[in-house]
Image (cartoon, coloured by chain):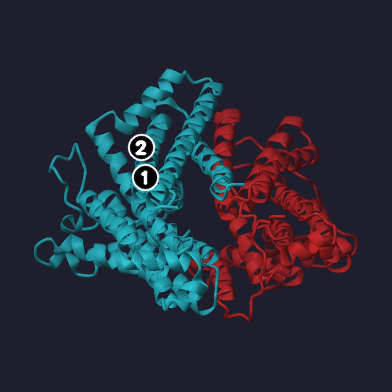
Chain colours: A cyan, B red
Amino acid sequence: MTTMALNLWQQMRMQTAIWISLAAVLFAVLVGLALVASMGVPLSDAIVAFADGAWGSPYAIAASINRALALGLVGIGFVLANRANLTNVGGEGQIALGGIAATAMSLYGGASHLPGPLPFIVPMIAAALAGGVWGGIAGVLKAKVGTNEVISTLLMSFIAIWLVYWCVQSEVLLRQPMNNTATLPESLEIPDVTKLPLLTGDPGMPLHWGLPIALVLAVIVAIVLDKTVFGLRLRAVGLNPTAARRAGIAIVPSILLVLFLAGALGGLAGSFMLQGEQYSLKARFSSGYGFDGLVVGLLARGSVPGVIASALLFGFLRSGGINMELAAGVPSAIVMVIQGIIILTLAGAAFWMERKKSGK
Amino acid sequence: MKLEMLAVFAGSSLRLAMPLLLSATGELVSERAGVLNMSVEGMMLTGAFAGAMGSLATGSPVLGLLIGIIAVMPVAALQAFLSNTLRANQIVTGIGINIFVLGATTTAYRAVLGSRSRTEIPGLGKWSPPFLGDIPYFGDAVFHQTWMLYAGLVIVALTAWVMRYTALGLAVHAAGAEPRAVDKSGLSVMRIRYGAVFFAGFMSALAGCFLSIGDIHTFTEGMTNGAGYLALAGVIFGNWKVGRTVMACLFFGAATALQFQLPAMGVDVPNAVLIMLPYLMALLAVGGLVGRQSAPPYLTHAFVR
């Protein structure tokens, strides 16, 4: 087969994938609408409330995009690790660790006394490192003992969720000083200098510096995956570890590095959520963003542009869903139903696509 | 520790371990057959919801239990179909089902009960075994439990026996260890694996019903709250063996019970640490720090004839 024919073939497969994804999303949204209708809420009310919350104002748009940033970073990490055939389901825990590290660094790590833009950059780096180490542990277990990374990253997510809980419950750790009985189990608000600066300076449009940072990272990862030797190595490790080892590729460092990087992206997502949106660490800090980010990565089918598209989709879905509950009284849980249907439809559809590929 | 406290502790450990024990036993069978059924959480939640609603609607908790079991079957069918027939990624389908069920039960719960969310739901009755129930201190605190707990223990014991001593148990083990050999011997790997997933669904339904109509007689949104994943951890920590899995679940139950017990004893251990403990133990187990792990070789590998 010539290179051109191969490219054409790949393009066609890509297009089928996009159409199937769109069909799955459409189907899921229709089911969601049918559910809304069956609850006796006028469809127009629900749709208006959804649109208002998702893109009805500059504020809403910015909030949706900020949500998409965290989802997208986890998704990119997933795609990166998945290139080496590793499934990182630990986004939730990596976000949590990132949040803890960013909070600790902002409040007690002295970041706020640093000059220039360092006060908000240093906590971000700390968060990425913490997430990276959390992901890297799964890499070590995989490389040394052969532990399935799905199981280890999943278990570590739960451990991390409760670590956050511990941190905000205990005054020795990150809980705010208990001045009276009404102080909530959460950290102090981080100093203003450690918050991510807004792009426009207009609080009505709270897009922050995370957006350009995430976009640059997305471009870098896309290039690394498709145009560099490292990307090719990952693919080789993923497709056939034995052959890759024979070809002289060091498997263990590859696994460690890629899981570290995926974790670092998750940690960074956590720092965006903390320094760009929530400003204080609370018990349910990660609130499902890691698991949603995993789904974003799955939907993307290995492509970075795909991650961006599905992260935006889920970001807007989340914002719209929240407002639908507030304004129209429709449980935002309907969004979960929609997400679940998308995941299951695509998981099932993979069968037909694989069969087409192998020509059976 | 006073004797009364010890008795209360033992009783609540057993009660809290029970949902894990049931669902982990089901999950164990499914994993032994080669299907990583990550949707335990969703199956349990479906069972808890349908059981509670059924009990509320009919006024009979036993009918509720039946409805709970029936309601989980479509979920099990979906999981089995996706992971066996469509050979979908078993982790993805599991997570998808869990998200879907959490959304669906929450939505349905609001639609059905709405503001009446504090309604008491008729629950299963309690029962004390003869003699054991008469032991001073312990009789009431430990053995006076819903009859479902005893029924559950019997089912777990039966499962252990079937898995160990019968041809059916051998076939299930083989489907996850040597699916090709099973196929050559004339048995259907597909059928065994479908059956195993349905069994996991049945056990998860029991576990869910135990939570909603056995233990606390109410349903709350997302009430399983990770118990399904804990059951998965139990199977891992139990090294895919019934006996050890049972021990792991009992231990997890005790760790959970300690959360309520330690403050009463004046010991200051953060709650979060105790809740985290089971996951940490499971991680140590899969990390090879607690002896060698031996997962079924063909776990998560769909069978292609």
Taking depth in this image into account, of B26 and B145 the one nearest to the observer is: B26
Earlier-in-chain disc, 1 versus 2: 1
Q: Residue at x 39, y 43 (%)?
A: A310
The chain carrying label 1 is A
Taking depth in this image into account, of A39 and B214 the one nearest to the observer is: A39
Q: Residue at x 65, y 40 (%)?
A: B49
Report crowding for label 1: few under 14, some 14 to 19, many 20 or more residues within 10 A (C-alpha).
many
Instruction: Give the CA distance from mark 1 to mark 2.
Output: 9 Å
Query: Looking at the picture, does residue A71 appear above or below residue B106?
Result: below
Tally of marks: 2
Q: Position of residue B42 (x, y in %)?
A: 61, 47
- Quadrant location of residue A50? top left
Report crowding for label 2: few under 14, some 14 to 19, many 20 or more residues within 10 A (C-alpha).
many
Tell me: A164 left or right of B252: left
Q: In the rendered image, which residue does mark 2 sit on?
A: A316
Q: Residue at x 45, y 53 (%)?
A: A1
Q: Looking at the rendered structure, which numbered label has been put on residue A311?
A: 1
Q: Looking at the rendered structure, which numbered label has been put on residue B62?
A: none
Q: Position of residue B163 (x, y in %)?
A: 82, 64
Closer to viewer: mark 1 or mark 2 = 1
Do the residues indicated by labels 1 and 2 lie within the same chain of the protein? Answer: yes
